[in-house]
Image (cartoon, rainbow, N blue to C red):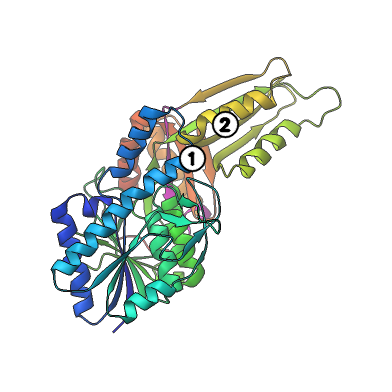
Amino acid sequence: MARIVQKFGGTSIANLDLIKKVARIAVASAQEGHEVTTVVSAMGRTTDELIGVARQISRSPNPRELDMLLTTGEQQSVALMSMAIQELGWPARSFTGGQAGILTESRHGTANIKQVNPEAIEASLNRGEIAVVAGFQGITPGQELTTLGRGGSDTTAVALANALEAERCDIYTDVRGVYTADPRILGEARRLPCLSYEEMLELAATGAKVMNHRSVELAMEKEMPVRIRSTFEPDDHGTLVTHRSASPEYAICGITIDTNQVSFSVKFPPAEDGHKPLESVSSLFTRLTELHIPTDMIMLLAREDEPLQELAFTVDHGYSSRVQAMIETIWQKPKGVLLTTDSTLTRLSIVGRTFTTRPEMVAGVFDALHNAAIPVQMVATGDLRMSVLLPTQHAHQAVKLIHERFDMDKELRVA
């Protein structure tokens, strides 16, 4: 039959009964004649619990030692998963990320995969075993353990699927696929049977939790078909993520929210002493790039009738203290600099291949928010999405209003 990679997240293996359940899914696929590689996350909230333990020792744990600790979560999972498969009468072998040939760069906590050497997995599959691989982790050329950041098990699964030249990669989770909105927020959200890599990348980057954005990039690079499926309804085919030529061209495919954003506003006087006006701004974003800290919703306002220029942008909450320290360092000398932050805002994004090219639809978003008296702090647009920054207290209401405005609970509009 085919070679497939299956990934099971923390909610799918949160306890021993669920581990036995997903073991049956893997064995059923092997019994159909497939060569099966499974990638598993840590059980339930194990990663968060380990981070909590580390912070009881140190308020700012050493990144190397934290990676050493966090990788134990997945190692527990692969051992238990392999035992569960063996108990069903099928041979299985567990692998750490390093044993599976996942080579990464040396950055702890958010390492990128640089290369996959799948020889050990190939040998396991050739022996008729189900290979069980620890997600979220890899190893550097210097034999240092690293982790791949939140959602890193998705990245492991797609990277292995690419290296093994698999027919597809199945991402098993606690929902039945990709929806027009988070079904836990909006019960009338519709499941999408198929969407493009580009659309899935925008959804993942703006708050959809079904796939990690880096894993979508890897799938797109090799045109690896990905199915997002439910662990609890394994016969349901879920949502297929594939090439845009094979997927409908939705006007809007989804609405996402990200409540983990912090907005920064820096008001500063024009530079003196012969410095270029934007030198400080350039220094800030150069440093952010060097530290791999992503930003969004960037605005720079400078008017002749306004004595202060303003820079505004958002970052993920986890980076906020480091970003604030950078700003205070860069603008420490000039007087009159005003720095404000706000962590009570949510970024809401509307994603669709033709959405931003249709002014009437963009206007519809503003009209829906205006009629409900929902204030908008910032706006940003891209090729496939429009994002607005609004108070978190209005986020769920805004999703519902926009969803209703474009009748997304009915048959989706194709451009």
Q: Is 353 included in the stretch rendered in magenta?
A: yes
x%, y% of residue 243? 44, 71
**Residue 195 visible in this rendered orientation of the protein:** yes
Q: Provide residue 53's location: percent of width, then percent of height.
A: 33, 33
Inspect this view and state whether residue 373 appears. no
Identity, as a three-letter code, of the amino acid under mark 2 = Val
Tell me where residue 225 sits by quadrant.
bottom left
Q: Disc 1 residue type?
A: Pro
Left or right: residue 288 compared with residue 137:
right
Q: Earlier in the sequence, mark 2 or mark 1?
A: 1
Residue 242 drawn at (x, y percent) = 41, 69
Q: Is residue 280 magenta?
A: no
Looking at the figure, which quarter contains the C terminus?
bottom left
Name the residue at 45% across, 69% down.
Answer: 244
Answer yes or no: do the residues labelled 2 and 1 have beta carbons within 8 Å? no
- Secondary structure type for disc 2: helix
Q: Tell whether 152 sits left or right of 10.
A: right
Q: Residue furthest front?
A: 143
Q: Which residue is mark 2?
A: 323
Residue 324, given in percent of the width and then of the height, sits at 57, 27
User: What residue range appears in magenta?
Assistant: 343-357
- Residue under numbered circle 1: 63
> How far is mark 2 from mark 1, CA to CA?
18 Å
Rendered image quadrant of residue 251: bottom left
Write the residue at 36% across / 28% down.
Answer: 56
Q: Residues within 10 Å of mark 2 (few under 14, many from 20)?
A: some
Q: Residue at x 17, y 63 (%)?
A: 84
Element at label 1: helix
